[in-house]
């Protein structure tokens, strides 16, 4: 049970990717995307916050879980929380939850979170960052699992 709660916490840590986007939309409102600084911020801040939270979790839970596992659960959280967070961010510009169809669309998006997160991130401006973080987390997890497997000593089987 503890392990399941810990993994859900790692998935919830995926929220770190979306918080900069929500804050940028809340601060800039209708002016978002009008400057080069907005474009740079939406590309850099979600990735930086994700990596900082990941580093904190890996350091905190050093003995409890492997880094690859933390990365994969956090990545699942990034993708699953995407539609909710982008809908929240769009609310500040007159879309999202300020629209009457937001809740039914969000409920429809629960089982379809992968294509919906992909599509919505293109409108949100986070598509390139989402792709980069996804590729990095997957590759780093695979290398982590392979390195752990190679580092384990092989014990010879006794002859019978």
Image: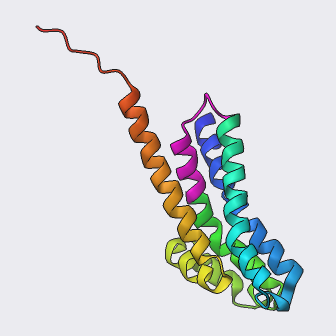
Q: Residue at x 84, y 91 (%)?
A: 31
Q: Quadrant of the N terminus?
A: top right
Q: Residue furthest left?
A: 160
Task: Please say whether residue 134 is visible from this viewpoint.
Answer: yes
What x and y, as percent, mark residue 131? Answer: 53, 70
* Residue ID at (57%, 79%): 108
Residue 149 coordinates in the image, percent (x, y) = 37, 33
**Residue at point 80%, 87% (across, down):** 32
Residue 68 is one of the magenta-drawn residues: yes
Residue 98 vs residue 67: left or right? right
* Residue 1 appears in view: no
Which portion, as a residue range, is magenta? 61-75
Judge from the rendering whether residue 26 lies leftward or rightward of residue 133; answer left or right: right
- x and y percent of residue 143 in the render? 43, 45
Relative side of 120 to 93, left or right:
left
The correct choice, above or below, for 152 with respect to 98 in the image is: above
Reply yes or no: does residue 62 show up in magenta. yes
Question: Which of the image's four quarters has the C terminus?
Answer: top left
């Amino acid at each position: 049970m503890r392990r399941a709660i810990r993994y859900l916490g790692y998935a919830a840590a995926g929220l770190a990717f979306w918080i900069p986007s929500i804050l940028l939309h809340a601060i800039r409102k209708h002016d978002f995307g009008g400057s080069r600084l907005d474009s740079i911020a939406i590309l850099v801040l979600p990735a930086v916050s994700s990596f900082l939270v990941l580093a904190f979790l890996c350091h905190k839970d050093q003995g409890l879980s492997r880094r690859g596992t933390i990365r994969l659960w956090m990545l699942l959280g990034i993708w699953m929380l995407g539609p909710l967070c982008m809908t929240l961010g769009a609310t500040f510009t007159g879309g999202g939850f300020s629209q009457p169809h937001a809740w039914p669309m969000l409920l429809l998006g629960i089982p379809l979170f992968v294509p919906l997160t992909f599509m919505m991130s293109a409108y949100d401006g986070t598509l390139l960052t989402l792709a980069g973080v996804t590729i990095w987390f997957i590759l780093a997890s695979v290398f982590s699992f392979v390195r752990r497997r190679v580092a384990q000593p092989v014990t010879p089987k006794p002859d019978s």
